Amino acid sequence: MSEQQEAPAEQPLGGVLVMTATAEVIRPAVEGEQENEEP
């Protein structure tokens, strides 16, 4: 039973880390694309 409670607790933490890391990679990429599109 305790193992099941630990698993869901780790999922949200991992999701936040993944979303944060992804946002850091996407933000500069999107900004760079917008700057390239505009003269």
Image (cartoon, grey):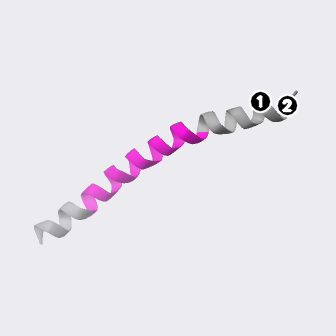
Quadrant assignment for the N terminus: bottom left
Three-letter code, disc 2: Glu
Q: What residue is shown at x 27% (from left), y 63% (from top)?
A: 8
Which residue in the rendered view is the most extreme toward the top? Answer: 39
* Residue at left offset 39%, top offset 53%: 15
Numbered range of the magenta stretch? 8-26
Q: Residue at x 76, y 35 (%)?
A: 34
Residue beneath label 1, please? 35
Residue 22 percent location from the top left of the image: 50, 45
Image quadrant assignment for residue 33: top right
Residue at 19% x, 69% y is 4
Circle 2/circle 1 CB separation < 8 Å: yes
Which label was assigned to residue 23?
Answer: none
| Residue type (three-letter) at the residue carrying disc 1 | Glu
Q: CA distance from mark 2 to mark 1?
A: 5 Å
- Placement of 38 over or under 17, stated as above or below: above
Q: Under tag 1, what secondary structure? A: helix
For disc 2, the marked residue is 38
Is 4 or 31 nearer to us in this picture?
31
Q: Is residue 34 magenta?
A: no
Q: Is residue 25 left or right of residue 7?
A: right
Magenta segment, principal secondary structure? helix
